[in-house]
Image: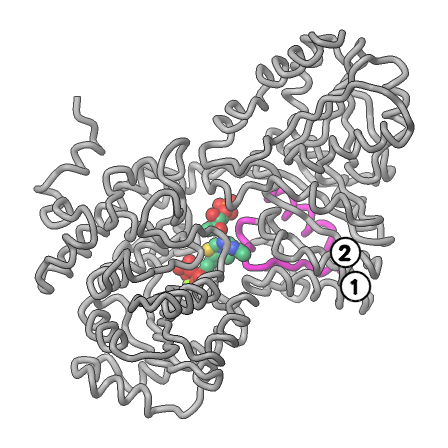
Amino acid sequence: MITYLEKMKTNSIFYPILSKINNPKDLRSLSEKKLSKLCLEIRRFLLHSVSKSSGHLASGLGVIELTVALHYVYNTPFDHLIWDTGHQSYPHKILTGRRDKMHTIRKKDGLHPFPWREESEYDILSVGHSSTSISVGLGLSIAAKKEGKNRKTICVIGDGAMTSGIAFEAINHVGFIKEDLLIILNDNKMSISNNTGALHETLLGETKYYQSKKFNQVLEKEEKFVSNSLKRRSRNFFRSLGLNYFGPIEGNDVYHLIRTIEYLKKRRGPKLLHIITKKGNGYLPAEKDPILWHCVPQFNLKNANKSIKRNKKKMFSDLFGKWLCREASTDPKLIAITPAMKEGSGMKNFCKFYPNQFFDVAISEQHAVTFAAGLAIGGYHPIVSIYSTFLQRAYDQIIHDVAIQNLPILFAVDRSGIVGEDGPTHQGSFDLTYLRCIPKIVIMSPSNEEELINMLHTGFHYRKGPVVVRYPKCYQKKFLKIQSFSKMKIGEAVIKRSGKKIAILNFGTLIEEAKIVSNRLDATLVDMRFVKPLDEKMILKLIQNHQVLITLEENSTFGGAGSGVNECVLKNKIFMPILNIGFPDNFIKQGNRREIYEEIGLNSKGIENTIQNYCNKII
Ligand SMILES: Cc1ncc(C[n+]2csc(CCOP(=O)(O)OP(=O)(O)O)c2C)c(N)n1
Ligand SMILES: CC(=O)[C@@H](O)[C@H](O)COP(=O)(O)O
Ligand SMILES: [Mg+2]
């Protein structure tokens, strides 16, 4: 039987134009008048495909016209097209030979969630974290010039991604060395949440000016438009940094885009084209609620909003948000900071109820950390809520601006461990490794909902230096009413089960699997809770009456919690077999969390097998 999707991908009745486009060359052979119809077909295809696959939708809907225009005007893949962050690249994937695989996106062995170098020659840069496009684009354009290739480089960056430090640093360089590069600023006034910041205000100003002058009428006459857009203001942010600034122009009109981009292609030097698009364009539910539709689970197209909301389950992040509200109710000095991840981090209610104690600093992880340092020095009680993978961006800030100065800041490190569908760029595989070596930092890893709350409470009131509570992207199993919390003794582990020969030292939420395994193997199970400081007394006691130690964590085993246990044992000059179980030494691909844990041997069966194989040689 032909499945719905199979029908959809081959059906030349549903998609008379799109079904014939297998690469951008096919697109470039179309007459221009077919392009707006093609955009409609892509939009329909995208909606159907994401409704089956899940994924990033609203941003892709907003750049369909831009994607068509860019591949139409430029000679891709010879010319280099870079999509910043990459969550908007689904239309690009559809047009570059991957249409038939779109239903596999974000799935195990399926298409990668973002542009990926190994996946296609049209993906010149692998991405996932934002704001890298201009730096890489500049490097590519210089390389092309040195090689004597008449190759063009185009970077598409969103107004959200433009707020990040690295994008500012790149613009500073681009405007100075004046290489040939086209930056397209896709301004839809949205990050995941509403965009924030002074740059956003500046862009708003540009947009209002453009609307008041009705530049889109002038656009019909391309030359006049361009000269007008050059004339109308002597300075704006980008122009004052040495870039040729054009626009803003309507970014959801494929013909205007083609005219403008063709014109800019002929001009050399650093250019920034400011386009105004609508996130979710052409699909009313997503236009109305682009936050909900930024990244969606599978949904039913007939009652889309409802089916998305119905599928939403409570996560650890929501518990963090509840705890935050509760703690803020007794502490006006509590300040919570997010670098553009308000919704994902569970802070929607907090920012509503405590707007004066909340800062969304836009996509600026480095600033978020150092800004917290300033607040802490000033006597406030900052909490930085941040995803494990994005905290990687702020490593020096944690060491130089926070830890060296012993500042009391709580880091709520969300999405630690496997996040699943977002793949290698987003897995929280390394935070224990990169944080554990920082002197005096306290690191906790809750194994369940109660521990999460108690650890956040303990960490927030610790006040002797930085504290990290790291927790995964997992659903709450228990409904917790947050009435009271208790402080934990720093560095204290608890025994969950007493057994023989084998002691399992668990760090984090794999405890459910560890319980099953310890019952089957009659092993001792300890909930270590603290990655730093380790409960050394407990480790030494376990060594006395067991033959093997097993450590279990949701982090790379290289330098993670298990490495800490190894160091403790070596330091005490003890010979003891230790097996570290955790993530393997590779970048873990996309898939759902359950599948990935199974594949890397972190379900109960896998853990038991690994332990047995190891112990067979010893016990
Ligand atoms: C370094 C980093 N921080 C945060 C994110 C999460 N993130 C992904 S998309 C996005 C919003 C980007 O907004 P914009 O660039 O304007 O694109 P739009 O979604 O509006 O198309 C954010 C915050 C990320 N991918 N990388
Ligand atoms: C592209 C990106 O970085 C975000 O959109 C991310 O996918 C959000 O992740 P969560 O869905 O886990 O909040
Ligand atoms: Mg945006």
Give the answer, above or below, for where 336 lies relative to 261: above
Residue drawn at 69 percent across, 60 percent down: 369
Tag 1 residue: 376
Residue 342 in the magenta stretch? The answer is yes
Q: CA distance from mark 1 to mark 2?
A: 7 Å
Picture quadrant where residue 379 is located: bottom right
Give the answer, above or below, for where 10 lies relative to 142: above
Number of disc labels: 2
Residue drawn at 65 percent across, 57 percent down: 394
Picture quadrant where residue 491 is located: top right
Q: Earlier in the sequence, mark 1 or mark 2?
A: 1
Residue drawn at 83 percent across, 40 percent down: 487
| Quadrant of the displayed image that contains ligand 3 | bottom left
Which span of residues is magenta-colored?
Answer: 316-344
Q: Amino acid at mark 2?
A: Ile
Tag 2 residue: 409
Q: Quadrant of the N terminus?
A: top left
The secondary structure type at the circle numbered 1 is helix
Give the answer, above or below, for where 232 lies relative to 284: below
Rendered location of residue 187, percent (x, y):
39, 69
Seen from the viewer's position, the closer of residues 21 and 514 is: 21
Callout 1–callout 2 Cβ contact below 8 Å: yes
Give the answer, above or below, for where 84 lies relative to 529: below
- Cβ of mark 1 under 8 Å from ligand 1: the answer is no
Seen from the viewer's position, the closer of residues 244 and 367 is: 244
